[in-house]
Image (cartoon, grey):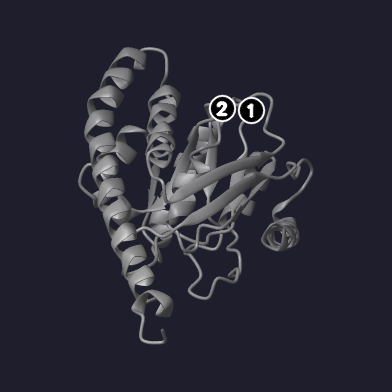
Amino acid sequence: MSSNTEDSGEPKQSRAGVGTTLLSIWSWFVFGACVALWMPMMAIVWLVTLPFDRARWWTGYLYRKLPVVHQKLNPLWHFKVSGVLPENPRNPYVVVSNHESFVDILLISHLPWEMKWLSKKEMFKIPFAGWLMRLSADIPLERGDRESAGKAMDLCKVALDRKVSVMIFPEGTRSATGEMRDFKDGAFRLAIETQLPILPLVVSGTRNALRKHDWRFGRADAEVRVMPPVPTEGLTLDDVDALRDEVRSLIETERDIMRAA
């Protein structure tokens, strides 16, 4: 019957909306429980490793496992890691990635090595989650503040000198349209100044995992792919623009391949 609402699909859509809402409530509960559990665990690891781990490698490494546990308990998300992973996680890289969503951070945290994240200063003010970022020695940046940018780059150099990679989104912020924004120079200048390789990452599929202005999670089948390192030995600051454009092109091409698969 044409009047049958079951045939019209409306009840199915309603049930799907209710189901997503309930699963989102569950997932947020799991996330909060993980944060509450991780705080004392990270504090203990920090205290135990303090005499020999100035870089807070192990404290940060534990922090990145929080999103792994959360994703396993979130039935709306499926994450995948692909590509060739670095053989020695203590060989430092300047790691860069395209930026589709806040969930990129949770996805990239599935990579099995520690990185110090360059993040906007506001993130560190978030209760509990921001405290964990500070405990793991992530690096704050105040956008548009040249002095803050200089201090952040100095902290990045300290982390790299201590054999810990740093993670930077060169777009600065996620795109509103889903297309890649222009890359900023900072990460590439840092790589040339330290003569360390760039490690490009490509993320795909996170855009609908958590939409702006909506607290509910969306279904996502997302992937982070590790690309071959791009060397910087012998490059000078005159090469920043060429290096930036080369890496952006590599990431954009691979992202398009992943989307088409």
How many marks do you count on the picture? 2
Q: Earlier in the sequence, mark 1 or mark 2?
A: 1
Residue most toward the bottom? Answer: 2
Asked if 249 appears above or below 151 in the picture, the reply is below
Return the x and y of residue 173 as percentages of the image width and height.
47, 64
Q: Amino acid at mark 2?
A: Lys
**120 and 237: which one is in front?**
120
How far from the left and from the top, in percent, is residue 155? 45, 40
Label 2 sits on a secondary structure element that is loop
Closest to the observer: 71 or 63? 71
Residue positioned 39% across, 34% down in the render: 69
In percent of width and height, residue 43 lies at 26, 24
- Write down the residue under mark 1: 91
Label disc, if present, on residue 168 of the rendered structure: none
Answer whether labels 1 and 2 touch (C-beta < 8 Å). Answer: yes
- In the picture, residue 15 is in which quadrant? bottom left
Q: CA distance from mark 1 to mark 2?
A: 6 Å
Say left or right for 226 vs 163.
right
Q: Is 199 positioned to the left or the right of 13 in the image?
A: right
In this figure, which residue is indicated by the disc labeled 2? Answer: 163
